[in-house]
Structure formats: C-alpha cells, structure tokens
Image: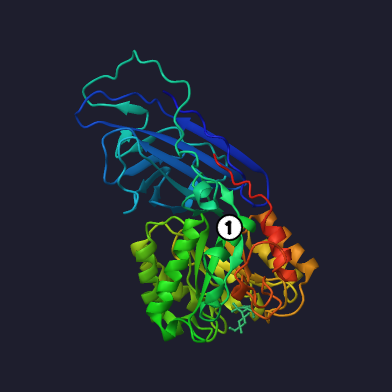
Amino acid sequence: MFSIPRPSRRHLLVGGAVGALALAATAVLPSTNAMAATGCAVTYTTNSWQGGFTATVTVKNLGDPVNDWTLGFSFPDAGQRVVQGWSATWQQSGSAVTARSMSYNGSLGTGASTTVGFNGSWTGANPAPTAFTLNGTACTGGTTPTTPPPTTTPPPTTPPPTTPPPTGTTPVAINGQLRVCGVNLCNRYGRPIQLRGMSSHGLQWFANCYNDASLDALAKDWQADLFRISMYVQEQGYETNPTGFTNQVNSLVDKAEARGLYALIDFHTLTPGDPMYNLDRAKTFFAAVSARNAAKNNVIYEITNEPNGVSWSTIRNYAEQVIPVIRANDPDAVVIVGTRGWSSLGVSEGGNSDEIVNNPVRADNIMYTFHFYAASHKDNYRNEVQRAASRLPLFVTEFGTVTYTGDGAVDTASSTAWLDLLDRLKISYANWTYSDASEGSAAFRPGTCAGGTYAGTSVLTDSGNFMRNRIRTPDNFPTS
Ligand code: IDC
C-alpha cells in the first residue's frame, strides 16, 4: 500500500506569506519473513513562511520492534537548517540531519509510529527531503534482508490513519497528549488548538467550590476545555501542609480527567515574588505530582504563577532546575514558565518579551505565561502580546475581566478586545476565578458553593456570565 500525502497544516501565526508542503515517500509492503525485518514509512509536513518553517515528521516502524531509533535525512537545499527540535535529539552536519529518539519514544513496535518535529530556517528554497532512513534502513517500505516481498497482494485503496480518530467528544478525548509546536499548543494531530477554561481560586480558601457537581458544570454546562488548579504556596497554602495540598491537587486532576478536561497544575507563587524562595518546595511538589500523573494525557504543569521583583535570568534559572524534575517522570508533558513582572512578559516592570527571546529557557515543549486584568491592562499590553506571539509560545494561565486587585466591575470592552485577540492568535486561557469569592472576578455569586448548584446562569456574576458565554462557543478542534 502507499501512503498518501497528509493534508497541509494550518499555518503558524507568523507574518508573511504562508506556504504548505506535504510529502509522503513510502512503499509499504507486508513482511513475510521471521528474520530481522526492517522498514519504515515517513511523512514529512511543513508549515512554511518566508525564511522559516515548522516541520512535523511521523515515523512508522514497519520492521521488527526497536528500542531506540535514529531517523536520518538530507535537506535538498544548502540553506535549510534545523533551528530547534522536539521529541528527539536533533543534529545537523552539512545538509545531513539526524533525529535520535528520546527515552520515552524510543521503543517502536511493528506498525507503531511516533511524531517528532522542529522549527527550521531556509534561505533559497524550502523543498521537502525525499529520502529518509531509520536506523540506517531506507524508508521505502517494509522489506526483509533475505526474502523479496510478495507482489501479488493488491494494495488497499486507503492507508490506515497514523493517528486513530477520537473515540469520545471531550477535549482530552479529541486532542489527546498536547505538545508545543512552533509557537502553538498542538494536539495529537500536530494541529494548533486553543484551550479555554477557568482557574480555581486558592484551594486553601475555596475547597468547597471544587467537587463533582461544580466540575460537571464546568465540563458540560460551560463546555470548558481546561481547569486550572491554583495551589497557593504561601498564605496558608502548600507550605503549611505539603502532603494535604498535593493530595488535593491530585484528586482534582482525577476529577478533570474523568470529565475529559485538561488540568493545569498551578504552583501559585505570588508573595514573595522570587520563585527561588520556593525552589525546594517546587522540586518536592513537582516530583510528586509528575510521578503520580505521568501516565495521564490531560496534565499541564505551571511551575511558577507570577514572579515579581526578580530578573528574567533568575526565573530562567529556576525553570531550568524545576523542569528536569518533571521531565524525569513525565517526559512529554507541556510545562509553562512564568515571566517577569507578575507574568506580564516583563511589561509591568518596564521590560518586554525580548529578554525571553534573547535568553530562552533551555528546554523543549515549554510555553511562557502571560497574565492580564482587563480593566487595568490594555493596549500597550495587547500590543506586546501580539508582538511576542510570533516568537514565543504563550499561554494565558490567568486573567481577570476586572482590575488587577481581582475586584471591581467587568470591563466588557477591554475583556472582549483581549479575548478576540487570544482567539485570533489561538492562545489558550484560564479565567480567574471559578469560585464564589466576594470579589468582581469570581464567576459565582457569594454563597453558591454552599448551595451546591453550579449550572445555568442564575448563580453567575457579571463576570461569570461573560466568561460562560465566551467559553461555551464551539471549539471546532481539528481531528486530522
Ligand atoms: C487574589 C485573590 C484575592 C486574594 C489575593 C491574595 O483574588 O482574593 O486575597 O489574590 O492572595 C493575581 C494573582 C492572584 C490574585 C489576582 C487578583 O495571581 O492570586 O488573586 N491577581 O488580585 N495576579 C494579578 C491579579
């Protein structure tokens, strides 16, 4: 059978002309020999724009199972370069490129496939490579060293899909394990998606708001994709009872999983603003939650909420110590790193995103946090997000429709401008808060959580109504 070119992907949100290339070079023939069988099929797809591209490479093992693998190919044009890869160790020498498997995707059974990718640059032209090898064997189809493949079997007319179609309709059932590709958050089809959801308030204060009924309402009535679990570290939070808060977070991860919601585990540092103050606690906490939740595909880790009063290099140093702790247990999960000035990309402390672009965290599959409060943060912040979004993967893990105090009236005009921007850029978000706190940012009226009814609009504040209307619109997640 022959695989067909995959459809061209959505373009990245980067200025300039967008082109798409798709290539599939395979001749897949059944193996009939028990001797060491080799063979492979590769699909290489790019989103390309002037000077840059993102490549998604799916490798299918048609031979005997392997425990690790090296993919090889050559760029046809001398100006093509791998800039930053993911899900493999990428190297380039001249035009020859290799991608070595990671510990978590090295084992590939017969017929199994895995997807890796990279951001690249090009100068003259950006043609797709035409020949690939897997552990030295050309990826032209299933072959055995000694027996020629039978030629009598007619090929089926359609190839099996590389990624099976979803078996459910929840956000996690459709999108599966997420990963960062280029500046986007991508689903298991390698397509950019936006997750829209709500943040809890501090678990130490509002535990009674997070239960089966409230999470049912979030998943079914609000049609949300995401639940942010905001675990304060200070203010009577984690530091006072590490085991208790760790268990509480884990149980909410399970409740999110049961409803097909992504769970964003927020290590909610706020005061003091230096994340290093909590470094040891962060390592202990993330070692525990990443080990416990490694097998799940709905978990995203947010390692520090709002660093403030510290340099970007300190935040980066913190990230480069905490991320390996998570990766050791849960190598494929997306990790989100807070930014300077209360996660304002530096803007609230007189900086901007250049400090991150010039000095990024040395880890792959990560995103950077941006927070805003719509009544306080307006055009200059929106402009910076728009500018940064073509260069950095951004995730709005928290925002309010009100002022930065968390209180006051909904600023409908500014909130609408913000969410329209995030929708257009496919930037995921969580709104502060899914709680009945006596403050304008809370979605529920005071006393709602004691009452136990969460669905519908009668329990909602102005902010809750505004957010439910935004979040309930269809996601239209891509499924191929
Ligand atoms: C606020 C809560 C408020 C609480 C205060 C201090 O709404 O009830 O007393 O924290 O813990 C943030 C923070 C978030 C803030 C929120 C609103 O991440 O913890 O919550 N905010 O002030 N950054 C900007 C605004």
Q: Is residue 311 left or right of residue 100?
A: right
Residue at x 49%, y 28% (from the top left corner)? 4
Residue at x 65%, y 70% (from the top left corner)? 399
Q: Is residue 116 left or right of residue 389?
A: left
Under circle 1, the secondary element is helix
Give the number of callouts. Answer: 1
Which quadrant would residue 317 be assigned to in this image? bottom left
Q: Nearer the viewer, residue 245 or 273?
A: 245
Q: Position of residue 301 (x, y in %)?
A: 47, 66
Q: Which residue is farthest front?
A: 451
Quadrant placement of the N terminus: top left
Q: Position of residue 394 (x, y in %)?
A: 59, 62
Quadrant placement of the C terminus: top right
Q: Which residue is farthest top?
A: 152
Q: How is the image coloured?
A: rainbow
* Amino acid, disc 1: Ala
Which quadrant would residue 34 be assigned to in this image? top left
Visible in this render: residue 438? yes
Q: Which residue is farthest right?
A: 413
Q: Is residue 128 above or below residue 304?
A: above
Mark 1 highlights which residue?
219
Which quadrant would residue 442 be assigned to in this image? bottom right
Question: Ligand 1 quadrant?
Answer: bottom right
Visible in this render: residue 223? no
Residue at x 52%, y 68% (from the top left corner)? 211
